[in-house]
Image: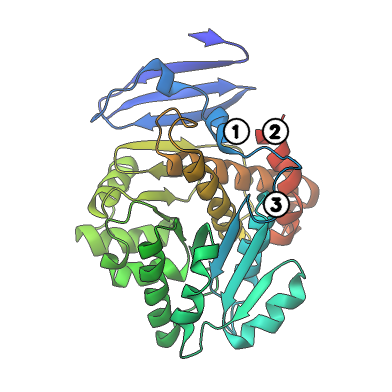
Amino acid sequence: MIWGRGAYVIVALASAPIIFWLQYGKVIERSFSVHKTHSIKEMENIFQLVRNVIPPLTAKKHKGQDGRIGIVGGCQEYTGAPYFAAISALKVGADLSHVFCTKDAATVIKSYSPELIVHPVLDSPDAVREVESWLPRLHSVVIGPGLGRDDVLLEHTKGIIEKSKVKGIPIVIDADGLWLIAQQPSLIQGYPRAILTPNAMEFSRLYEAMLRDPVDNSDYHGCLLRLSQALGNLTIVQKGERDLISDGEKVLVCSHEGSSRRCGGQGDILSGSLGVLAHWAFLAGPEKTNGQNPFLVAAFGACSLTRQCNNQAFQKFGRSMTASDMVLEIGTAFNKLFET
């Protein structure tokens, strides 16, 4: 079946049907579990689904309508991670980006960019109450960039997660936020608006905490499905050579071309971008995603965008590429993938 400039090739395997989308010489896999059949309509271009949820630019909007994102993280040792997440959210298209960090980190993060709204409250005795007062104004929160593992900060973060759940806000959890979840999975288990973004080590830690077995390296798709199901069908982005994305029912595989450079900060760019796209997809609803889980669509978009930024920056700087170089590529990468 071929139309336009792309084609789908369906390959039946013992474990699951795999759909390879061929376009412009690149291959993107969409792998679905055997537990559900999928119509041809559901096999359409995943990039178009991402485009569908992106709000149009119009002079009739006011500041804040296209996204107010909160980043929870940033301590004395780690100030770059929350900055990368917050600035990426703005670059993708959020109107306002808030960082809730410790007092020591606040001045440093403010010095990186005047565009960020920085709250030095995360280590205060009233941290949960302080952040809770802002939650009605936020469309999503990203938990973990630069959080660290200080017991006081982790305890405050638990409270912030609970308050965010009560408000029904989409929650993206990354970095040390995932370490916290591995210690106490019940914090997020069963909350359908949560998205976890583990790397290989973080995924292994989560998997062993929930399934009590080591990850089966011969069955990454199956392990991802089982972990998502054990957590209540949360959306999980397993970052790696290829990004695997699942909600416990299906698995999307993002093989968009990136580079072999693995500098620090790339995961923060992903989590910040995902915070925005998760809000847009959730707001757009299933009619814009053809019935697909909006968070799967958002995650695929964020993974593709991060990889495109990585690719563009690497072409310019090669081995010396840093996350700051990737941030500068967000606008052109977004335009190339989703607006042309």
Q: Position of residue 329 (x, y in %)?
A: 74, 49
| Colour style of the rendered protein structure | rainbow
**Mark 1 to mark 3 CA distance (whole Å):** 21 Å
Disc 1 designates what residue?
Answer: 51
Q: Position of residue 59 (x, y in %)?
A: 76, 42
Q: Residue at x 49, y 78 (%)?
A: 148
Residue 214, placed above or below residue 102:
above
Q: Residue at x 71, y 42 (%)?
A: 333
**Mark 2 to mark 3 CA distance (whole Å):** 22 Å
Viewer can see residue 213? no
Q: Closest to the observer: 15 or 66?
A: 66
Disc 3 designates what residue?
Answer: 62
Question: Residue 126 — which label?
Answer: none
User: Residue 40: which quarter of the image?
Assistant: top left
The residue mark sitting in front, 2 or 3, is: 3
Mark 3 Cα shell of 10 Å, populated few (<14), some (14-19), many (≥20): few
Q: Residue at x 56, y 75 (%)?
A: 100
User: Residue 266: which quarter of the image?
Assistant: bottom right
Disc 2 designates what residue?
Answer: 339
